[in-house]
């Protein structure tokens, strides 16, 4: 059987080469998983001869959603590979995973997949101790290095935090095991560590220094879309809607200028704020803003504050009739509709609906955070070379 499979692979390559084209949709098919790991290496080697370079110059990961409020993808670490659910987070720079060295009292660790370096032949000890404490969370552990795997690309010597302490808030409610940060390296909290996307660039694993999210609004599936590394997917956008937004503080956050925000109800516009700034947040469904403005928005939604959850709830029977909210950026209107931005959760036949608009924990913060409630409606490209975010209407 192995000989037959290998022969078929060679014939396919030869036929495609004769026809002068090679079409492998790496966004949909993992060659290694389709024809076996050994043959996956063989076909990559053969393709290298055709193209003159390592053939995988981009890659992707499926994005899943949990409770309509959290977004994560799958990644593998080590040799043999250990699989983890991770948030590809545009507000973090670093990578962390729960560690097998967690104490039994570490509840979050015990509820998630844990990395075990002793089971990986490519594990390298680092030894640096990390402790991160803020008003929102705490993390602690030790840095380690290992190889990370996307569908077709292997990132070697990725240093990450093996977390032996993970605070209950906010991580106990997460489906994700850990985080792969995609913010600028200057935001890193681990000294001397190269972030994940920078390793993709410096190891020449991607041709274009860009990563792309496109999400869906389908409530019937847990598939939330894709993230592409080193590629765009402009066939997924409505023509003539692509807008370039310059990053206002390169090497800090994916922060862009917002010309204004307004809500629309019964065809009448209600201003929320004038010029401000916004940061893209790919990990959560929420849209975060200054306290007084969030209260103003939720008042328009007739939302009720639930102190125990620190969220505002809306009437599930009426949420599709709530006002739309528009963010004006680079002269273009980006309107999100309530039937998509409201977070609807059903557990054991009990239904609850939440406003995505929540108050920033930092009262001094002068910017908004645009999470899935925005990104589900709009395709986003994050371009490292140009220090820009390209936004467009997604085709659904």
Image (cartoon, grey):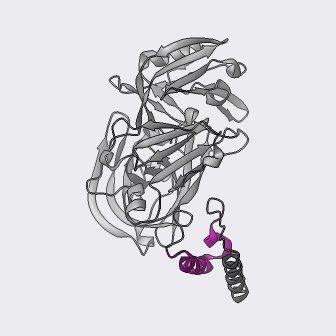
The residue located at (49%, 42%) in the rendering is 172
**Is 190 a magenta residue?**
no
For residue 195, above or below residue 218: below
Q: What is the quadrant of residue 40 in the picture? A: bottom right
**Is 38 a magenta residue?**
yes
Image quadrant containing the N terminus: bottom right
For residue 305, above or below residue 254: above
Residue 134 position within the rendered picture, expressed as x and y whole percent measured from the top left: 32, 37
The residue located at (38%, 53%) in the rendering is 163
Q: Main secondary structure of the magenta part?
A: helix
Image quadrant containing the C terminus: top right
> Which span of residues is magenta-colored?
29-53
Residue 266 position within the rendered picture, expressed as x and y whole percent measured from the top left: 67, 11
For residue 11, above or below residue 301: below
Taking depth in this image into account, of 242 and 40 the one nearest to the observer is 242
The residue located at (65%, 70%) in the rendering is 22
The residue located at (40%, 66%) in the rendering is 203
- For residue 177, say whether it is visible: no
Question: Is 170 on the left or on the right of 34, as rendered?
Answer: left
Residue 127 position within the rendered picture, expressed as x and y whole percent measured from the top left: 27, 63
Taking depth in this image into account, of 134 and 298 the one nearest to the observer is 298
For residue 165, above or below residue 279: below
Residue 352 position within the rendered picture, expressed as x and y whole percent measured from the top left: 65, 27
Q: Residue furthest bottom?
A: 3
């Amino acid at each position: 059987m192995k000989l037959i499979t290998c022969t078929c692979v060679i014939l396919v390559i030869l036929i495609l080469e004769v026809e002068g084209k090679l079409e492998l949709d790496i966004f949909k098919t993992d060659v290694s998983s389709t024809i076996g790991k050994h043959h996956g290496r063989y076909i990559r080697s053969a393709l290298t001869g055709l193209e003159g370079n390592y053939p995988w110059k981009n890659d992707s990961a499926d994005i899943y959603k949990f409770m309509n409020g959290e977004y994560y993808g799958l990644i593998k670490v080590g040799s043999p590979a250990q699989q983890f659910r991770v948030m590809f987070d545009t507000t973090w720079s670093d990578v962390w995973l729960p560690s097998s060295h967690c104490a039994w009292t570490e509840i979050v660790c015990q509820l998630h997949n844990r990395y075990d370096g002793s089971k990986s032949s490519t594990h390298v000890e680092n030894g640096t101790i990390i402790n991160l404490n803020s008003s929102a969370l705490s993390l602690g552990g030790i840095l380690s290095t290992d190889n990370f795997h996307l569908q077709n690309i292997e990132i070697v010597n990725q240093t990450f935090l093996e977390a032996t302490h993970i605070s209950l808030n906010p991580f106990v409610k997460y489906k994700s095991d850990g985080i792969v940060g995609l913010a600028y390296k200057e935001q890193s909290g681990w000294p001397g560590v190269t972030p994940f996307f920078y390793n993709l660039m410096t190891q020449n694993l991607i041709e274009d220094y860009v990563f792309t999210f496109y999400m869906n609004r389908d409530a019937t599936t847990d598939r939330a879309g894709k993230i592409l590394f080193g590629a765009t997917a402009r066939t997924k956008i409505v023509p003539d809607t692509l807008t370039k937004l310059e990053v206002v503080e390169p090497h800090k956050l994916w922060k862009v200028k917002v010309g204004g925000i307004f809500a629309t109800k019964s065809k009448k516009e209600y201003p929320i704020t004038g010029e401000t700034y916004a940061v893209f947040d790919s990990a959560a469904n929420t849209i975060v803003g200054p306290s007084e403005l969030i209260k103003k928005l939720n008042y328009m939604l007739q939302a009720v504050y639930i102190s125990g959850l620190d969220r505002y709830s809306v009437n599930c029977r009426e949420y599709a009739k709530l006002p739309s909210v528009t963010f004006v950026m680079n002269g273009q209107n980006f309107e999100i509709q309530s039937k998509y931005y409201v977070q609807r959760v059903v557990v054991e036949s009990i239904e609850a609906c939440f406003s995505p608009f929540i108050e920033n924990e930092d009262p001094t913060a002068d910017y908004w955070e645009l999470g899935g409630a925005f990104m589900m409606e709009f395709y986003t490209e994050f371009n490292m070379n140009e220090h820009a975010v390209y936004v467009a209407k997604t085709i659904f």
